[in-house]
Image: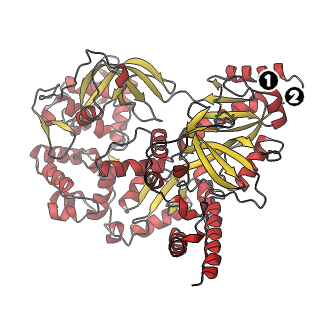
């Protein structure tokens, strides 16, 4: 190839790659497959290796790394990177508007604001000269930051060259570098595989990845970027409003959060806050609030700045999801299968709007790995509905008398020996159903929603029934009478009848629920579903040996051994007979080879469920999909194969449509399921 032809092809490839980056990051409408993209990229790399005279700093190949640096150079920001004033209540937002009206009484009302999510990442300033990225700097103290240009160049969402014909002399685009939850989970899985420490949250992971001395590591970390403002700009860059300027940046190739909106007055701001609060759990990235800005740039200039923040912008924060508090003590809970879980007793603290005084410490190996001690100030995290957890200690606040946490040698409830299976982190009580704690948990599990679903039989009532000697094993529930229950203190005749009715109703169940309810170690809903689909009857499962069980997809030697051991115990056989004699029944399942084979429509596919289904609960749909070999995930990405959309499907459906991912409605989903279980 002549140098002239090579130069032409190189330009062609670069412009194709830029176009595909734009389609992917800005339009969220990929134009080519990953494989096609990679092929073009490799062709460009090969040509540049052969003709190095044509390498330019804005070539897409220049993203991929470079040698590690000794440290980061300091960069003085030409325009300081200010922070934002915060508000935690609607009143504080009202005060913000009052301050604006006091300073600018002539501002047209209702005041027009831009509103957008506040990304939980780290701020960056990207300096473009004549359209080429020449410097990327972290915020630092607002005046002086660190030069992270080499690292920022590896982030594919950051354009190396602006897509405009007459680029301005200078424009500094500012925004947030962040990590999606999906990228974060994948990164942590890789960290654990390598035996390295997982990151505590996506923000730490993003910060740790951007501030890497080795840009090749940053390149592997899948960081993202949204623009939200600017620093130094040549005259004529800014247009009339904030939103229009952001639209211009977007046109130039810098992604802007699509949830940015124009809102009017105080009501517009508070409504937007509520909407984002509701959407927060569904987003594929962490946000810690929303940001409002007076939309008119002329009015922004009139309102000006305080020493640390613009007067025309405000961050309305969500209630904190993490807090610091003191670890007062550690107690040990015994689970259904004897697993010992250390639970932190904490000085009460509000986390994400909820009072928290205990949190899980997961297991004793985690405690050791994180070096948590009693007396430490610890970081407590609450995410959505999940149990609060202790993230780690604040070592700078460790008191001299902080006490080491020693794993127990005996079960704290029954005194039986504590055992640890080889290669497992969890400690177990060896007392089996003789341990009152294990028995209580097993009974609670049996009646739970996803098992026999007996409403009204809560933990306190179960404890009372055990104490009275009326219930020892699950089949004893079916021998209770309303008259007997009504003799309990605080139990009215009506409640007693309701409970007996609920017990009666539970007799009509399904084989997977029944199997799950038995509480066989490591047989969750999905495994129960797989067993039922594979064998069809309880008898077949009870008679299966380990080899037959291992033929079921995803059942390995450990689970197979647990199942065989469980059904071999005379006490378990007796309980199962008791349950069947009490009248527990289910419809037959006709086992199908297809149901578990890779020939299944859903086998190996990544599926997202959204919206409300009418014929089954979300959990059931999930279990059935998993039983068919699908991976069910929470967020829609390019890796999603199907989205199953029930009624009132929202942002996930919209994203699927945006990305061109096939969507099945409930009817189509049922048809596909029907095809799997003839
Ligand atoms: N979303 C968003 N975050 N954030 C942070 N917008 C935004 N604006 C900021 C900051 C510091 O400052 C503006 C004044 C550009």
Q: Would you say the beta carbon of the disc 1 residue lies within 8 angstroms of ligand 1?
A: no
Image region (quadrant) for ligand 1 = top right
Q: Residues within 10 Å of mark 2 (few under 14, many from 20)?
A: some
Q: Residues within 10 Å of mark 1 (few under 14, many from 20)?
A: many
Determine whether, in the image, residue 205 is placed left or right of residue 8. left
Asked where in the image residue 574 lies, by quadrant, the reply is top left
Determine whether, in the image, residue 443 is placed left or right of residue 571. right
Q: Earlier in the sequence, mark 1 or mark 2?
A: 1
Determine whether, in the image, residue 161 is placed left or right of residue 199. right
Q: Is residue 650 visible?
A: no
Residue 486, how many percent across, how many down? 31, 22
Q: Nearer the viewer, residue 137 or 102?
A: 137
Element at badge 2? loop
Residue 133, how many percent across, how many down? 64, 53
* Contact check, label 1 and label 2, Cβ < 8 Å: yes
| Quarter of the image with the C terminus in it | bottom left
63 to 473, vertically: above or below: below
93 to 165, vertically: above or below: above
Q: Nearer the viewer, residue 513 or 509?
A: 513
Determine whether, in the image, residue 148 is placed left or right of residue 23. left
Residue 340, how many percent across, how many down? 22, 33
| Residue of label 1 | 100
123 to 225, vertically: above or below: above
9 to 645, vertically: above or below: below
Q: How was this image coloured?
A: secondary structure
Asked where in the image residue 394 lies, by quadrant, the reply is top left
Q: How many marks?
A: 2
| Residue of label 2 | 107
Question: What residue sits 64% from the left and 22% below the top?
Answer: 89
Element at badge 1? helix
């Amino acid at each position: 190839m002549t140098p002239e032809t090579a130069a032409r092809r190189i330009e062609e490839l670069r412009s194709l790659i830029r176009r595909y980056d734009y389609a992917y990051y800005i339009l969220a409408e990929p134009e080519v497959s990953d494989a096609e993209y990679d092929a073009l990229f490799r062709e460009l790399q090969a040509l540049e290796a052969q003709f190095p005279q044509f390498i330019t700093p804005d070539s897409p190949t220049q993203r991929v790394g470079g040698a590690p640096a000794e440290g980061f150079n300091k960069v003085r920001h030409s325009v300081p990177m200010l922070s934002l004033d915060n508000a935690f209540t609607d009143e504080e937002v009202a005060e913000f508007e009052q301050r604006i009206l006091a300073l600018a009484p002539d501002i047209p009302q209702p005041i027009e604001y831009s509103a957008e999510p506040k990304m939980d990442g780290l701020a960056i300033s990207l300096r473009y000269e004549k359209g080429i990225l020449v410097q990327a700097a972290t915020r630092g103290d607002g005046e002086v930051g660190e030069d992270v240009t080499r690292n920022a160049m590896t982030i594919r969402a950051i354009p190396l060259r602006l897509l405009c014909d007459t680029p301005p002399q200078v424009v500094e685009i500012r925004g947030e570098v962040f990590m999606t939850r999906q990228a974060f989970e994948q990164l942590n899985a890789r960290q654990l595989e390598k035996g390295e420490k997982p990151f505590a949250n996506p923000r730490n992971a993003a910060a740790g990845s951007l501030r890497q001395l080795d840009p090749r590591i940053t390149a592997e970390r899948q960081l993202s970027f949204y623009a939200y403002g600017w620093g130094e700009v040549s005259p004529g860059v800014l247009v009339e409003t904030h939103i229009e300027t952001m639209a211009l940046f977007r046109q130039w190739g810098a992604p802007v959060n699509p949830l940015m909106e124009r809102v009017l007055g105080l009501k517009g701001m508070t409504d937007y806050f509520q909407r984002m609060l509701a959407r927060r759990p569904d987003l594929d990235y962490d946000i810690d609030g929303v940001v409002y800005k007076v939309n008119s740039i002329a009015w922004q200039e009139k309102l000006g700045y305080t020493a640390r923040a613009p007067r025309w912008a405000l961050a309305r924060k969500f209630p904190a999801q993490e807090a610091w508090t003191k670890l007062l003590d550690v107690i040990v809970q015994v689970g259904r299968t004897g697993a010992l879980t250390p639970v932190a007793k904490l000085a009460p603290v509000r986390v994400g709007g909820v009072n928290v005084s205990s949190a899980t410490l997961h297991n004793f190996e985690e405690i050791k790995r994180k070096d948590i001690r009693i007396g430490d100030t610890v970081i407590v995290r609450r995410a959505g509905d999940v149990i609060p957890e202790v993230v780690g200690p604040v070592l700078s606040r460790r008191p001299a008398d902080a006490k080491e946490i020693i794993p127990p040698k005996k079960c704290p409830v029954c005194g039986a020996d504590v055992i640890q299976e080889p290669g497992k982190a969890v400690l177990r009580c060896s007392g089996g159903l003789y341990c009152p704690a294990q028995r209580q948990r097993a009974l609670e599990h049996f009646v739970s929603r996803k098992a026999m679903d007996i409403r009204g039989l809560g933990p306190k009532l179960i404890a009372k029934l055990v104490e009275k000697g009326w219930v020892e094993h699950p089949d004893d529930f079916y021998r209770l009478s309303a008259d007997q229950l009504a003799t309990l203190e605080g139990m009215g005749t009506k409640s007693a009848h309701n409970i007996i009715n609920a017990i009666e109703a539970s007799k009509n169940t399904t084989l997977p629920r029944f199997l799950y309810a038995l509480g066989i170690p490591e047989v969750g809903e999905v495994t129960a579903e797989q067993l039922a689909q594979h064998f069809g009857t309880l008898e077949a499962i009870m008679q299966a040996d380990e080899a037959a069980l291992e033929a079921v997809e995803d059942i390995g030697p450990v689970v197979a051994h647990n199942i065989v051991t469980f059904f071999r115990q005379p006490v378990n056989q007796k309980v199962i007979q008791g349950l069947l004699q009490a009248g527990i029944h289910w419809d037959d399942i006709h086992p199908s080879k297809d149901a578990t084979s890779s020939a299944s429509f859903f086998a190996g596919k990544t599926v997202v469920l959204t919206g409300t289904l009418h014929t089954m609960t979300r959990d059931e749909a999930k279990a059935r999909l998993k039983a068919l070999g699908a991976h069910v995930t929470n967020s829609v990405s390019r890796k999603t194969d199907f989205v199953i959309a029930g009624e009132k499907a929202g942002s996930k459906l919209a994203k699927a449509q945006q990305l061109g991912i096939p969507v099945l409605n409930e009817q189509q989903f049922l048809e596909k399921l029907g095809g799997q279980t003839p």
